[in-house]
Image: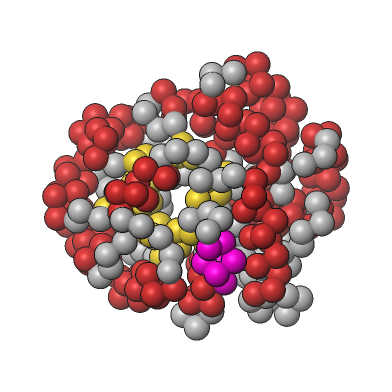
Amino acid sequence: MTPQDLKTIIGSGLLSFPLTDFDAQGDFNPRGYAQRLEWLAPYGASALFAAGGTGEFFSLTAQEYPGVIKTAVDTCRGKVPIIAGAGGPTRFAIQCAQEAEKAGAHGILLLPHYLTEAGQEGLAAHVEAVCKSVKFGVIVYNRGVCRLQPATLVKLAERCPNLIGFKDGIGDIELMVAIYQKMGDRFAYLGGLPTAEVYAAAYKALGTPVYSSAVFNFIPKTALQFYEAVRTDDQATQNRLLHDFFMPYLEIRNKGAGYAVSIVKAGARLVGHDAGPVRAPLTDLKPAEADELAALIRSLGPQ
């Protein structure tokens, strides 16, 4: 798959980040992960992000990472493209990108570097180094300490032909408009704020019609129903699902820092696809919070 092929794919439909399965001891559980991917693949996401943010990339070791990506690629071969998460320090991000390419992934989502702030020149050097270390497509994730400006993206697009996607996890509307106006169709654009459904209609109006869904991990039919409602401008369905599910879901998610991942693992467990506990420093939902989530899921009917 060429970078341009990947660009076309990620702009064509709903994407999602599968959870990474851990056993009771918190170790990677490849069998459970493969079963999860086998369950999700037929629902029709245009691509799946292995070891992404919802997949707890930030908690994986260098030794575990290749196995996660290889399991995803082997399980989904011929079914759905796999885009690997990569990030952290530049040399580690390069190592991840090259391991993902070796495993047969179709591209990477370049997650933010670790901890320290950096100027635009440094951010550009980081992204360029990762892009030039591989041949497949790269999607950059504007989030946290990685806040690329339009002028920086113009230079990166010139230097890195395989930089084909831009995902926004900041929510700065002025910046997003400026980037889209500057870059046009040079990139495929993805919405990447937590619980992206809440922002989906607004981002579509900004020229970003595609997003990645975390709730696809436990309510895939509803996730696809909502995406279709956004795609077709079905305001009635959007409003109903926002009122009945997504806004109450946000109330639970916002009760704890890091719950954007924890609540998804809780949802998967509640629908019979347990991915194990989250790894520290994240914490799992409290029992009462999980009960609230269970009631919400039941209200949606069979998935």
Q: Quadrant of the N terminus?
A: bottom left
Q: Could you say which quadrant of the image residue 12 lies in? A: top left
Residue 222 visible to an observer of this rendering: yes
**In the depicted view, which residue is nearer to us: 250 or 129?**
129
Q: Position of residue 205 (x, y in %)?
A: 41, 23
Q: Read off the magenta span.
A: 71-77
Q: Could you say which quadrant of the image residue 224 lies in? A: top right
**In the depicted view, which residue is nearer to us: 253 or 100?**
100
Residue 142 visible to an observer of this rendering: no
User: Is 175 situated above or below 161?
Assistant: above
**What kind of secondary structure does the magenta stretch mostly adopt?**
helix
Extreme residue in the front direction: 78
Q: Could you say which quadrant of the image residue 252 lies in? A: top right
152 relative position to 261: left or right: left
Extreme residue in the bottom direction: 63
Display colour scheme = secondary structure
User: Residue at position x 19%, y 56% from top?
Assistant: 160
User: Is 300 situated above or below 71?
Assistant: above
Q: Is residue 74 magenta?
A: yes
User: Residue at position x 66%, y 21% from top?
Assistant: 237
Total residue callouts: 0
Q: Position of residue 228 (x, y in %)?
A: 58, 29
User: Residue at position x 48%, y 56% from top?
Assistant: 81
Q: Quadrant of the C terminus?
A: top right
User: Residue at position x 82%, y 56% from top?
Assistant: 272
Q: Position of residue 55 (x, y in %)?
A: 57, 61
User: Is 87 situated above or below 299?
Assistant: below
**In the depicted view, which residue is nearer to us: 243 or 231?**
231
Q: Position of residue 98 (x, y in %)?
A: 35, 73
86 relative position to 28: left or right: left
